[in-house]
Image (cartoon, grey):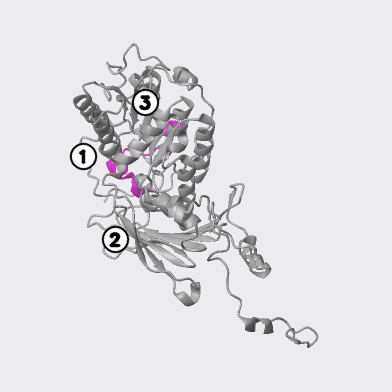
Amino acid sequence: MSPQRSNDFTRDSTGDLKSQPARRDFLASTAIAATAVGGMAAGSFASGGHSTSAQAADNVAGSNSRLRIGFIGPGGRGFGAHVKKLCDLRSAGRAIDLVGVAEVYQNQRDMVADYIKESTGTDPGRYVDYREMIEKENLDAVCIGTPDHWHHKQIIDSLAAGLHVYCEKPMTKTVEEAFDVEQKWRDSGKVMQVGVQSTSLAVWDEVNELLRQGKLGKVLGFQTEYFRNSDVGQWRYYGLDPKMTPKTIDWSRWLGTEHDLAEDMPFDREVYRQWRRFWPFGSGMFTDLFVHRTTSMLKATGLRIPGRVVGAGGIFLEYDGRGVPDVATVVADFREGVQGMVTATMCNEASRINQLIRGHYGTFEFGNGEGFDGFDFVPERGPVTHVRQSAERIKTKAIADTTRAHFENWLDACEAGDPMLCNNPPDLGAAAIAVVNLGAQSYRKGKVFFVDEDRNIGNDDPGWASRWEALSKAGGPVQHIPGWEAGDYGSKQRTPDYMKYGGPWIDGKDPAAGS
């Protein structure tokens, strides 16, 4: 175990929200000179900051016939998924060029750039500061694969520079940042995809249509999971390398101290490589894993921002210096009268719960994971529904490589210039963050979080329960998922004849007298 470290570094919840001009004035507007890289620790980054043949003289802004893409922080997922999938898609004929790599770890930067050069025949520009890459490489788009605490700033900077964005999940570190990204994205008109690849499965749009048509009757809730197990502890399987040193990694830039993204702390390979275990940089399973399944369920139901969120859990086994829990559950209640639950442990994988959506007239069961070619409809019993229904297997299109499909979807949207072609745009990304991040904060702070209809977040809403009680007393109306088309189907109770004998006796008079 490494020396004891704090898990409670101060962090700006909103990041740098200053407006910024287009990419040609980008570095000047943020007071970053082109010599910034050279001004770092002596001898640290000899390969950083040079422009190469990837930037052809005739590729001026606005005249690109091919999409010029740069990579920000292509570490594990950023290299294994972002870089490699886009290299494959380029080889398959997509009109893209991979022209820049911005990475604070020298060895990783060179490995990624060398891979791109070998795959495409063009040596990409190599940078430490992503803003210099944006300025010099005449980009059309970026792929962001940095730790969570950097996402908000890098997204905002990229959108402000007029670029399309693919950002690895979670979209941001905090809910406030997520709402800001959503608004900046809407204002920008640019294409942005959040990297929850399972949203590129056709099944979720198909399920949404069935739900809106009333297949399950009134939708009541969903449950989902992301169980894992490991003999070394979750995320400790990311190996530490003695080549990771303050001379090869720009530690201050990785922390983001210049932008108040994290407090300064001594260099630590464990924090650098296994940052998901520590609160200043990630939120453990809440934002690394729960966000996957939660996003899919939100897409399937059409739900977005929850009204009430509570989280629970603890560190019950993985006593290795981590801050994040190894057992956790989040419950989110929505104003549409739906409850969502996501739960897991990082210490047991063999007995996962099924993913499902429940309605008054039946249930959709999806099994585990995302590699399925269908799902099951399980009807409720006839005496409840008074409708003749049979159990059935509903087939759907299986996708062998969801990550590739997700990048293809993003490229299609970029080429069309249509932000709403993306399968996981920022409005969906923000909704998922509202569920999982508020769940994490609830667990840490021991509070319940409420989000009002204006997206104000608080810890107290004494009217939450009374609103549902008022609907009951008034006899409805029943609240439904967005786009509901089925009227009262599966949404009303039968009133037995004997209920006419109910009611208060006023002045000793039977309310049923004369019935």
Residue 443: % across, % down: 46, 58
Dot 2: within a 10 Å radius of its alpha carbon, few (fewer than 14), some, or many (20 or more) residues? some
Q: For the residues marked 3 and 1, what is the alpha-carbon distance in whole angstroms?
A: 23 Å
Quadrant position of residue 264: top left
Residue 250 placement, left or right of 428: left
Label number found at residue 79? none
Q: Is residue 493 above or below residue 488?
A: below
> Magenta stretch?
257-278
The residue shown at (31%, 14%) is 56
Of badges 3 and 1, the one in the foreground is 3
Residue occupied by mark 3: 129
Q: The residue tagged with tag 2: helix, strand or loop?
A: loop
| Residue 261 at least partly seen | no
Residue 69 lies in the magenta stretch: no
Name the spot of residue 323 as percent of width and height, x first: 37, 52
Secondary structure at numbered mark 3: loop
Q: Quadrant of residue 471?
A: bottom right
Going from the N terminus, do you reach mark 3 or mark 1 first? 3
